[in-house]
Image (cartoon, rainbow, N blue to C red):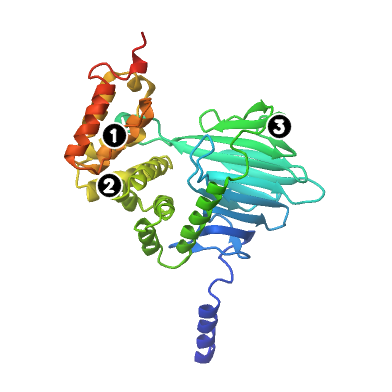
Amino acid sequence: MSRTCLVGLALLLALFPRMSHAGKALATCEEVQGVLLLRGAKEWQAVKKGESIPAEALLFALPEAKIHSANGAVSVEMKADISQRGPMPALESAIQLHSAEEVDLDITLDRGILVFRNLRKEGNAKVLLRLHDSKIELALRPGSRIGVEMYSRYAPGIIKEFTGKLEAPSSQALALVLEGKVFVRTAEEGFTMQAPPGPALFQWDNFDKKVHVQGLEKLPDFIRPMTEMEKETFAKAVKAAQTLAGGDRKKAIAALLSSKEPVARLTGVVAAGALGDVGLVLQSVENKDHPELREQSIVVMRHYLGRGPDQVRQTMKQLMTLGKVGPIKASVFIELLLGFTAEQKKQPVTYDILIKLLDHTRLGIRELAHWHLVRLVPVKTPIAYNAAASEGDREKAIAQWRALVPRGKGPAHLNPK
């Protein structure tokens, strides 16, 4: 090839770097509200409307994106529950597509919320839904919609019990028929589901690995249009996430975390966790200026750990590197992140420890202890505790907690008359 041809090819590549992604296209990006990122061989790449999506690539959407199967039979909406309406936290959504001949779309739900819709005027749209190593076939009637949400987490105390290979976290999926009818087939059985009233909901987990159907009289309350306030928050999240479509995502996330806009900061820490920058999330747990960012960072860390053993090991590594602590203290911090067992929640010593930790030398530990207390102890009037406040101001709030939860007795609801 001549030097002139090589120069011409280089110019074409420079002018049209986004014509397509590598691999056979299995779907097309139809709409992006925020950002849709595809993990390539070396780094994440932004996917824009009209671009194709190849097999086996991991896709991450924040807060929403829509794709269509290559044959136009089925659409998939990838959603994040930024209003925290649903029964499980869905901070972002992530999927993988696989080559398929007998179905319209073969898809793995890694985490988050998906909504499938049949786009055909006649005939079923067929989806092979993979949840871990389970395969569930969905046949959607024309006009039908079904939503699926999956969330994973480690049980409290898993690190303490860890003596060898860390097992996979527990995962739970819920599927809800929103419109029309859907025929569901597993390896053992098949059944028809429909929008309420009727058999509208199924549950699945990675231990039982069976689909359990439940009838509903009506759709749950969280299936409703957004309020004006929710629309405003969503628009801010979309605007913040759009900044991640550029080249330097670390710089973009850092800018979001330091933004004056609260929604931008929260979006930034979600993106940091979703893209695997656990160091930034851990730093945000100790942010001195923004309590809401510290609280969101704890949720993101719990979400991140639930993705699997690699995330636990990476967190341990970052804690020992950034926090400059040994493996024992790092594992204690992770145990605190994972929370308490049902038996531990009944023991007064659990609350004694949490109240003591409100005065810990590390801001992140203080914040985490308070995060648990407000969720474990019912209060009529919230106690004004700020983990980043001065020692004197913290002492006043700690005294209130101690008056509410006497040493050795635990909360009032554990001591019924």
Q: CA distance from mark 3 to mark 1?
A: 41 Å
Q: Quadrant of residue 136?
A: top right
What's the amino acid at mark 3? Pro
In the image, taking residue 240 as reference, residue 386 lies left or right, namely: left
At a point 26% along the width and 46% down the height, the residue shown is 319
Q: CA distance from mark 2 to mark 3?
A: 45 Å
Q: Earlier in the sequence, mark 2 or mark 1?
A: 2
Check whether the beta carbons of the residues at disc 2 and disc 3 lie within 8 A of each other.
Answer: no
Query: In the image, which disc is placed on residue 196?
Result: 3
Residue 158 at least partly seen:
no
Estimate the x, y position of residue 223 in percent, counting from the top left.
62, 39
What's the amino acid at mark 2? Glu
Q: In the displayed image of the protein, which residue is found farthest to the front?
A: 381
**Residue that badge 1 annotates:** 369
Check whether the beta carbons of the residues at disc 2 and disc 1 lie within 8 A of each other.
Answer: no
Estimate the x, y position of residue 288 in percent, counting from the top left.
26, 49
**Residue that badge 2 annotates:** 286
In this view, the residue in front, 4 or 235, is 235
In this view, the residue in front, 246 or 16, is 246
At a point 60% along the width and 40% down the height, the residue shown is 148
Q: CA distance from mark 2 to mark 1?
A: 13 Å
Residue 152 at least partly seen:
yes
Estimate the x, y position of residue 77 in percent, counting from the top left.
61, 50
Count all numbered tags in the image, as a single digit: 3
Q: Secondary structure at mark 2?
A: loop
Estimate the x, y position of residue 226 in percent, counting from the top left.
59, 45
In this view, the residue in front, 400 or 215, is 400
At a point 54% along the width and 28% down the height, the residue shown is 208
